[in-house]
Amino acid sequence: MDTPESREWQRLAFVENRDGRAAALVFAHQGIAQYESAIRESDSGGNQYGAAYRESLIASTQVYREYLLKNETPA
């Protein structure tokens, strides 16, 4: 089944396989920042991309957070 979650896992695997785990971690951090920004903008009446895709953006950020939790080493 093609869900927002499965697509994000595929993206993360692609980036990790192509560029390494460090790049995938950066990708996840950037994705969280971009998607949360889009949601905040739509909530304040700005760009409506976040409103139109809110549920999939939230699902994607959850995947990114799970990936980071599993793959980041504590400092």
Image (cartoon, rainbow, N blue to C red):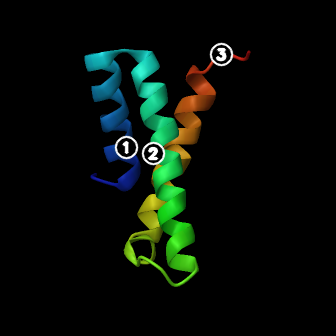
Residue linked to disc 1: 8
Instruction: Reply above or below: 64 against 15.
Output: below
Label disc, if present, on residue 48 of the rendered structure: none
Other residues around mark 1 within 10 Å, as few (<14) / some (14–19) / many (≥20): many
* Label 3 residue SS: loop
Q: Quadrant of the C terminus?
A: top right
* Callout 1–callout 2 Cβ contact below 8 Å: yes
Q: Residue furthest right?
A: 75
Instruction: Reply above or below: 20 against 14.
Output: above
Rendered residue at 40%/22% (across/down): 23
Indicate the position of residue 47 as horizontal and vertical percent values: 42, 76
Residue linked to disc 3: 73
Query: In whole angstroms, how far apart are the C-alphas of marks 2 and 3?
Result: 19 Å
Residue type of the residue flagged with mark 2: Gly
Indicate the position of residue 65 as horizontal and vertical percent values: 58, 40
Callout in the foreground (1, 2):
2
Indicate the position of residue 7 as horizontal and vertical percent values: 31, 46
Residue linked to disc 2: 31
Q: Is residue 37 left or right of residue 16?
A: right
Label 2 vs 3, first from the N-terminus: 2
Rendered residue at 47%/65% (across/down): 38
* Label 1 residue SS: helix
